Each structure stands twice: as structure tokens, then as C-alpha cells.
Image: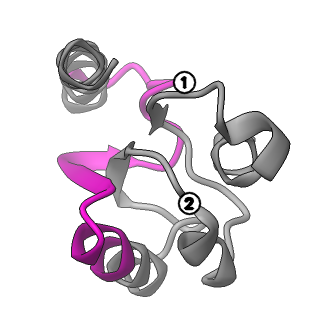
Amino acid sequence: MVVYLISHPELSSTITAAAVGHPSMLVEEEAAQIKRPILFLCAETDYLFSPELQAYFEKELTANGLGTFHTYPGTVHGFVTRPDGSQQSNQGSEKAIQDAIEYFKKNI
């Protein structure tokens, strides 16, 4: 949803920056459509945002200066929005939230 909002021509003009804490169902073509700074909070293991897809987005979005990517060790898909209760997941979620706050302080 976040990628849609910042890539849609009629909506992206009102959005200064975005963060994705639960990347899902993205396709490579969407990387080129992103026109605003975006922070990806990535799980170490993510079946919906594979290492290959993450690498593609990272290559495309860091080349144009729009993408920032953080990967959190020991985490799995959904850790930011739904940590599994493990110490590593909880710590990763807390760190990701703090990273997002700092990112927005710098980008909005």
C-alpha cells in the first residue's frame, strides 16, 4: 500500500517520505515508479520480500538516492508490525521503529 501511495501520480505529490515495515507482494516494476524517499525495514528472512527482490529494489532505489534499507538480524517477515515474541524479534521491532522515527525526522 505504501509503495502505491508514493508511486501514484495523484497521491505522491502530498507525501514527502515513506517507510515500509512489512514489504509484501511487490514486483520489480514498482521500484521504478517510486518518486519519493522510502525506508525499507527488512527482515533477515522474508518469504514475501526475497533476498533477490530486496537486492533489486535496493539497487534501483539507492542508485537514484531515494531508497534506504535496513535489515534486522534474526527477524522474519512481519517482525515490525507483528513481532513473534522472541527477544531478537522484539529488539528488531523496537530498533526498526526507532530507525523509522529518525528517518522521518530527517526526511519530512
Q: Position of residue 97 (x, y in %)?
A: 30, 17
Q: Position of residue 70 (x, y in %)?
A: 21, 49
Choose top left, top right, bottom left or bottom right for residue 104. Answer: top left
Query: Secondary structure beneath disc 1?
Result: loop
Instruction: Identify the residue at horizontal 48%, vertical 80% (top origin).
Output: 53
Q: Quadrant of residue 108?
A: top left
* Residue at x 31% of width, y 45% of height: 75
Question: In the image, is residue 75 above or below residue 99?
Answer: below
- How many other residues sit within 10 Å of disc 2, few (<14), some (14-19) or many (≥20)? many
Q: Is residue 51 left or right of residue 65?
A: right
Residue topped by disc 2: 34
> Over which residues does the magenta segment extend?
58-87
Query: Which of the marked residues, 2 or 1, is nearer the chain's N terminus?
Result: 2
Name the residue that disc number 1 marks: 82
Q: Nearer the viewer, residue 9 or 30?
A: 9
Question: Does the segment drawn in magenta span residue 2?
Answer: no
Pointer 1 local density, CA inside 10 Å: few below 14, some 14–19, many at least 20? some
Q: Looking at the image, is mark 2 or mark 1 nearer the viewer?
A: 2
Image coordinates of residue 37 in percent, x first then y, are: 38, 45
Q: How is the image coloured?
A: one colour
Q: Quadrant of the N terminus?
A: top right
Name the disc covering residue 35, or none.
Answer: none
Amino acid found under the numbered disc labelled 1: Arg
Residue 69 forms part of the magenta stretch: yes
